[in-house]
């Protein structure tokens, strides 16, 4: 007799007396790669995943069967998108810089109000260095040796001609004895008769408008643009540029301007550059020698300001522009692009692609109410002005 329960007895039989047959082995369906799994929803779901091995290192997830072949990155498209993005950023920065610079410029001179204007070829810009002390503290005036005179006068004047036959920079001596044409006061409205005096007296009488009219009247050249900077702005620009290199044939010392230079080449800061631009008493040829030095200095500033190291470097460009634009007085049609062209033209003059000279003059003696003056060398001056007026190649020299 077997004491084990029937369920544990290998010899158990069903009620009919027959030994029970084992249940056939159930085969789990397998899934072929790339073929969606087939489900028999009528079959008992035992909770096991069909045809997959769990825990094995070589197992693959279902996503691997659905994904196609992996495509290589489209580098051409990525580079194109990157270049477009860079172009948009550069354009946005450039436009922002332009409008920022344009907003800081003092467009105070309306050349459309100048009377009896001549016509000439090319583009002419009157560049003026005034003795304006606006914005300078007493300490600045002492440091820069500017003095404390009231009112504004022209300390330097140059005509920059840009044309198809090269660029020309002509310095106008401030002692040049000229006819100041009849004019109507811009503020008083009073009518003034024509007079004879030094060219720089025109500015002191009625500002930039009368100065432009006087130069146009005496030269026959139309001034398309006007740019003026005072003492403080000039010194600040040089300092922001990191100084400019100038060379001297011999030592120069002048207590009036503060000039104190050794012979040879040296870097000048803003204070020293202004002293050089204003010095005339320590020069043998006085005001004519000073205009030559002013040309060299202006060319050196233009060369450095228009260099890639300044234009492409925002840490240099923005401070330099900010230092000069606040004190720069220009005509209403002027703008950042016009100024850049002006600097590039001066740079080309310095590079030997143009001409740089004084307006040909000769000593004129002492004139009543004017003192010691210069009169132009009529033959050479007229030839020079005719060549510039017609945008011809300049062959005249001041030697």
Image (cartoon, rainbow, N blue to C red):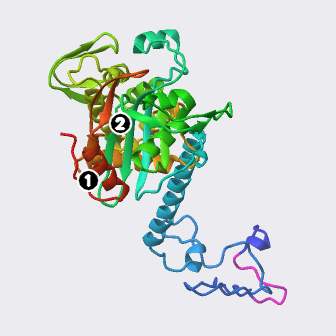
Q: Position of residue 347 (x, y in %)?
A: 31, 45
> Is 232 above or below relative to 184?
above
- Quadrant hosting residue 390: bottom left
| Left or right of 261, for residue 71 | right
The answer to whether residue 1 shows anywhere in this view is no
Query: How many C-alpha atoms fall within 10 Å of the one at disc 1: few (<14), some, or many (≥20)?
Result: some
Q: Which residue is mark 2?
A: 172
User: Dot 2 lies on which element?
Assistant: loop
Q: Quadrant of the N terminus?
A: bottom right
On screen, 371 above or below 78? above
Which of these two is toward me, 283 or 270? 283
Does residue 155 appear in the picture of this structure? yes
Q: Which residue is mark 1?
A: 394
Residue 294, horizontal then vertical, whole percent = 31, 31
Q: Is residue 356 above or below residue 286?
A: below
Q: Secondary structure at mark 1?
A: loop
Q: Magenta segment: does it hold 17? A: yes
Image coordinates for residue 82, horizontal then vertical, percent: 48, 62
The kind of secondary structure the magenta stretch mainly shows is loop
Which residues, given as a range, are shown in magenta?
A: 10-18
Q: Residue at x 25, y 28 (%)?
A: 289
Q: Look at the image and tell me in which quarter the C terminus lies.
A: top left
């Amino acid at each position: 007799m077997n004491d084990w329960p029937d369920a544990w007895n290998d010899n158990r039989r069903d009620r009919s007396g027959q030994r029970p047959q084992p249940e056939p082995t159930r085969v789990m369906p397998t899934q072929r790669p790339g073929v969606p799994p087939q489900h028999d929803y009528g079959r008992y779901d035992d909770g096991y995943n069909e045809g997959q091995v769990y825990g094995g290192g070589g197992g693959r997830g279902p996503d691997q069967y659905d994904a196609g072949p992996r495509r290589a990155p489209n580098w051409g498209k990525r580079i194109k998108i990157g270049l477009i993005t860079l172009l948009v950023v550069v354009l946005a920065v450039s436009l922002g810089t332009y409008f920022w610079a344009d907003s800081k410029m003092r467009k105070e001179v309306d050349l459309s109000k100048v009377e009896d204007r001549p016509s000439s070829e090319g583009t002419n810009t009157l560049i003026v260095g005034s003795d304006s002390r606006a914005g300078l503290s007493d300490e600045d005036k002492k440091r820069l040796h500017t003095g404390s005179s009231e009112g504004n006068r022209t300390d330097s004047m140059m005509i920059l001609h840009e044309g198809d036959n090269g660029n020309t920079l002509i310095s106008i001596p401030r002692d040049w004895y000229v006819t100041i044409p009849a004019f109507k006061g811009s503020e008083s409205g009073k009518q003034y008769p024509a007079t004879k005096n030094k060219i720089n007296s025109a500015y002191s009488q009625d500002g930039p408008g009368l100065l432009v009219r006087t130069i146009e009247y005496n030269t026959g050249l139309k001034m398309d643009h006007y740019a003026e900077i005072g003492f403080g702005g000039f010194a600040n620009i040089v300092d922001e540029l990191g100084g400019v290199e100038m060379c001297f044939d011999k030592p120069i010392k002048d207590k009036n301007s503060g000039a104190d230079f050794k012979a040879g080449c040296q870097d000048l800061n803003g204070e020293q550059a202004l002293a050089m631009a204003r010095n005339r008493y320590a020069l043998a040829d006085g005001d004519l020698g000073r205009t030559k030095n002013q040309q060299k200095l202006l060319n050196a500033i233009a060369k450095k300001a228009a260099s890639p190291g300044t234009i492409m470097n925002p840490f240099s460009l923005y401070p330099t522009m900010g230092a000069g634009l606040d004190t720069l007085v220009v005509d209403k049609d002027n703008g950042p692009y016009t100024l850049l062209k002006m600097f590039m033209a001066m740079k080309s003059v310095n590079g030997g692609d143009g001409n740089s000279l004084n307006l040909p003059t000769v000593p004129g003696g002492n004139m009543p109410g004017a003192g010691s003056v210069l009169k132009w060398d009529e033959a050479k001056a007229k030839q020079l002005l005719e060549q510039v007026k017609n945008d011809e190649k300049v062959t005249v020299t001041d030697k």
